[in-house]
Image: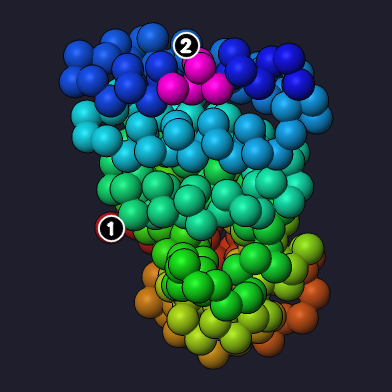
Amino acid sequence: NALNPIIKKAIEILQFTAKQQNFDEQDLSTIIDFNLSVVKSLQVQLGSEFVIQIVRLFLEIASLPNRSSQALNKLLEMLIYIVQHTGITSTQLMPDILKLTIDDLMRVQVDIAANLFSLFDAMLQNHWNFFQKVHVTRNVQEDLMKILTAYGQFLFQTASTDPNCCRIILSSLESLHEKCHLYEKAFFKNNLLKNFLATLLQLVSSDGILFYDQIISIIFHMSEKNKSALHECLVQVFRDGQKTIQICEVTDFPTFEMLMGILIQDAHVAHVSQ
């Protein structure tokens, strides 16, 4: 391929330049953006080896300290595309991507949260089976738990101030359950379901909550897998034992939605009258 010598030289220059302390973050963002365009346009011609090499280079650069949120967001956009569109190539890159996102970037979520959670969603949606196998380089089952725990923590701490990330996470949970039966998995039922229910019930009880219908639907489908957890969380959030019993006995969504609406409205009225 006539482009290979040029690309090889460009990568060598980038490897040297990007690690310099005074490397301009705007230039890095532009370079990442350019390489994403190259991957999108010439992926077949360049082959999987080039994609793997260039992505690993950027992952190495991104792991260095003091990278700007602008450059990291550009990299995350590239990784989302790679994970969604490059098949076996992206599977080979999954351990590297998990190392950066979980070991490094998860601690600095604030300005990159939307793209970080979109990347987590893309990895789970497109490579669910990857997380079900044993790998030499990483404990991917533990990585899966960390991603879903981060979903719950974000909803608990930041949902009201970042509706875009809230939407990404809620849609990811819904889609994962539809495609992979997430709420039925033993690791989810035993370790995460109750905390998710408590967080979602707390959210849906708030005034002016966005995505109300979506949250109610998720609560219903999660609660189908553990009615006792639903009962405990409802009592904890609303402190209304009688209505809680009625809701837990319901097996159809329209009735569940109606009774939840009454419970939430009664809680709001009681709060105002205090």
Extent of the magenta region: 8-12
Q: Quadrant of residue 210?
A: top right
**Left or right, residue 242 beside residue 225:** left
- Residue 167 in view (yes/no): no
What residue is at 78 percent from the left and 63 percent from the top?
179
Q: Which mark is residue 274?
A: 1
**How far from the left and from the top, in percent, is residue 80?**
61, 37
Q: Which residue is mark 2?
A: 30
Q: How is the image coloured?
A: rainbow
Q: Secondary structure at mark 2?
A: helix
Q: Secondary structure at mark 1?
A: loop
Q: Is residue 21 above or below residue 104?
A: above
**How far from the left and from the top, in percent, is residue 161?**
38, 36
**Left or right, residue 251 beside residue 37:** right
**Left or right, residue 213 beside residue 103:** right
Q: Nearer the viewer, residue 258 or 25?
A: 25
**Picture quarter with the N terminus:** top right
**How far from the left and from the top, in percent, is residue 233?**
45, 77
Q: Alpha-carbon distance for marks 2 and 1? A: 56 Å
Residue 177 among those drawn in magenta: no
Other residues around mark 2 within 10 Å, as few (<14) / some (14–19) / many (≥20): some
